[in-house]
Image (cartoon, helix red, strand yellow):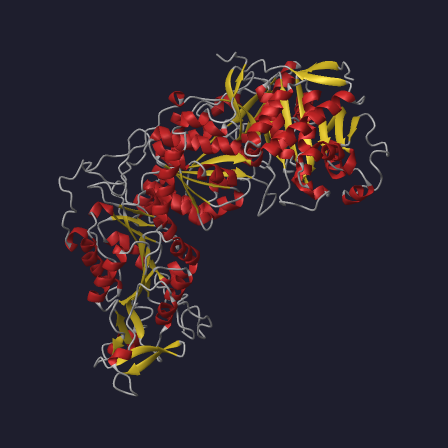
Amino acid sequence: MSKNPRIIELEDVVVKFAGDSGDGMQLTGSQFSDTSAFVGNDLSTFPDYPSEIRAPQGTVAGVSGYQVHIGHKDVTTPGDLADVLVAMNPAALKTNMKWLKPGATVIIDIDNFDQKNYKKAEYIEDPLNDGSLEGYNIVKAPITSLTRSTVKEFGLDAKTADKTKNQFVAGILFWLFNRDLTIGENFIQKKFKKNADLVNANIAVLRGGYNYAETIEAMSTTFLVNPAKNKKGLFRNITGNIATAWGLLAASEKSGCGLFLGSYPITPATEVLQELAGRKHLGAITFQAEDEIAGICSAIGASFTGKLAVTSTSGPGLALKGEAIGLAVITELPIVIVNVQRGGPSTGLPTKTEQADLLQALYGRSGESPVIVVAATTPANCFSFAYEAAKLSLEHMTPVILLTDGYLANGSELWHIPEMKDMPEIHPPKVKDNHEGYMPYIRKPENLARMWAVPGQEGMRHRVGGLEKADKTGEVSHDPYNHQIMVGLRQEKVDRVANYIADQEILGEKDADLLVIGWGGTYGALYSAVKELQHEGRSISLAQFSYINPLPKNTEEVLKYAKSRVICELNLGQFAMYLRSKFPQYEYKQYNKVQGLPFMISELKAKFIDILENKGK
Amino acid sequence: MKENTDFAPVMIPQDYKLDSPVKWCAGCGAHAVLSSIRNAVPETGVKKENVVFVSGIGCSSRFPYYINTYGFHSLHGRAAPIATGIKLANPELSVWVVTGDGDSMAIGGNHFIHVIRRNINMSILIFNNRIYGLTKGQYSPTTPKGSVTKTSPEGSIEEPFNPGELVMGSQGAFFARVVDTEPKMMKEVFIQAALHKGTSVVEVLQNCVIFNNDVHENITGKDVRDEHQIYLKHGEPMIFGKEHEKGLIYRNNKLEVVTIGKDGISKEDILIHNARCTNSTIHYNLVKMDQPEYPVAMGIIRAVDKPVYEEMLYDQLDHAHEKSPIKCMDDLLKSGNTFLINESSS
């Protein structure tokens, strides 16, 4: 008999799915987020997975998670703490208890809560009876056993049968969030379209989960999150890595320079290479090199030959590419280096996020070796910044390092789909055949970009290389005064990019009591924290930098009027060191975190309130 | 603008000369190689705008500055990947890599084996003088064991690489060896290397007059060269010696030097060189031949047909473009799961 549950309308909800790496939690999570997008919710997601592919089953090391934040209001982060946790085993519960909101709903697969699994999760006492779950709404669902009995009639083998249990979870959530089951059924039909048995089994399990939730007493309250109030139009859910790859493809199409990616697999950047490898139909050439160095060198060769050249990597790979970036600097060839930052140094925390490659990006090369550095701020705007990085590189004939991070790369958000006709034009300084008086180091007077002739063009034969070039002719030169001129020109060329980029925006008053300064992927958390404090009547504003080198022309104006400033970053203060070197006249406080985790809104708010209330002390 | 002729304009070596001075030492073997290249390139039938020379770092790697083509003097060891990018970006280009024994066998060793494994259509010339010249005389990966150099004052204790062995081990399809004192041989081989489809590697035994003078003298010296070298030509018997009296046969699973007319050996018993044999056993043995037991093999030792990387790549690109309904960015952006929010689907 069905009951009439109480429906609570919520502005936003955070749901966390956690289980063994093999439990299909990423799939359940993405199914939930797709369904949310389908019903019009704003959303942001973040997977949290171990660096081992299949750590021992049932252990804390093997827990894989997927967090989804959906909202009627604007959603800018995957959320600090969960309203709903799905824990497929004790280890998943143990790992995620500390990220729960008080009173959260916790759905566990009771079939896995036994002595054997407690031991694997290193629980000393039974968590269901030791009082640690006091205050939470615990739903002890026999997910495994009910799934098995549901699929019995379909004659699946035990392994395949168990794989469908994520649909049981999905079914519970469909009921919990008052959603139309047919959306889930369509998802399954699409997903398994080649196998009718699997479609039927999964749909049966989905319905089983839904009916179970409707029946049991433990779930008397359901949630309703209405469609996003500030969003209108055609959207898709996109991760930072895919958005990065697509931004590069878009820049290639717009500029008419074919895309060439020379790369080497490295977490968390590999998806950029994978995505583009599957885009040959759009003319993208990907070359999986023997190492990081060959990756960038092949890209430099392609750039010399007139392509939009890209290499993608993470911190340790950026270190290996340093010498080759210097070569691109001195040969003044365009190349985009995508650095998806992760925890370091060395192998560090490959699957976790950090912002500690900033100084490496700015200065990690021999000699005076300036490059443009830009940073994306959200998963979706990786598209815009990959596009912008390519545009700046091609038009200014210089390497550009695009900084994203593991959080942006794997996280996703709803993205308003752009149209190519609205994307800005890209005009590389290419010359026609037999261009009279061509010399490789003749520059455009306004931005100092050198003119680009490529092999195959008639009448333009020339040589480039890593030895210092004579001004204009590009001949090898060891002349001391020429070196000074060329070092100066290369610096000036990058400095002048400031004339071509957007001014820095401030969210809030420019003379606020506290100016929060961030850069790159911390935007979502900083934005939310500042917004919430503004609503609470605090005098606080935010400047989130995307253009790192050069800084926007109005940067001094942005910094000048604030009564105090705090620079927040996921490192020990690299942007702070940089701003202090550029604008030493101002005082900066710092808030730094290096746990491999993004900022939480709550910790930021606490820090800002502390500064605001103790200012001057 | 389009050329008014369909055939490549006839080039002469002079077309590839630059005004800037060549800065190798007087007496350096590289001068002769440069001149042979300038003579060979016009005969490859490639438009001069389509020729690209790429090098790494070292004495030999200054090469692109001395020839009037498109050129890239890159990083130590990295010529192969740079050349790879150039070739994949535009397969119509005729790409040459000029490298040395340090550049290709030490710092660039990894790239060297991988470019060969992929079989990207380019010609790699290794100037092997068995020493680091530009840094003034340290042992290299091809320096003979026991050699006294600035960094091996008591004699090198390292086994040297034989570049040809690495080529064979990397499933190479083309390997040739020449000496810097034989301009005619160099020109012939360079042309064939350029015409070969796939990665072709030519080892040039080159003299360093300053730091390793006469290192190849035991092979190239006027009085010994006929006895200590064998110039292999496809389809011809493997005969050498001043009087063409010596030859090679394959017996007891190894090559053996024999004298024609002695011990019942006749000219018919001598192996015929088959550079196009896909099985590399004999080629491998030929590559390894060394003094004093054997003459050193010169000429094209191996030249077999193999699928070429960039041809397969462009086939995949064409096929994917044909097959996919997604033809442009706007198609891609709207593909898959999209969601219309706060708008009735009209």
Q: Quadrant of the N terminus of chain B?
A: top left
Please tell me whether residue A602 is drawn above or below residue B179 in the rendered image. above
Please tell me whether residue A133 is drawn above or below residue A225 in the rendered image. below
Q: In the current view of this chain or complex, which residue is farthest to the bottom?
A: B263
Can you give x and y, in whole percent of width and height, for residue B346 in the image?
48, 12
The front one of A67 and A140 is: A140
- Tally of marks: 0
Q: Is residue A552 left or right of residue A75?
A: left
The front one of A245 and A482 is: A245
Can you give x and y, in whole percent of width and height, for residue B37 in the image?
22, 58
Where on the picture, by quarter, is residue B139?
bottom left
Q: Is residue B108 left or right of residue A7?
A: left
The front one of B231 and A506 is: B231
Please tell me whether residue A322 is drawn above or below residue A186 in the rendered image. below
| Residue A305 visible in image | yes
The front one of A1 and B324 is: A1
Can you give x and y, in whole percent of width and height, for residue A453 in the image?
27, 39
Can you give x and y, in whole percent of width and height, for residue A475 in the image?
26, 47
Residue at image x 24%, y 46%? B50
Where on the picture, by quarter, is residue A332?
top left
| Residue A102 visible in image | no
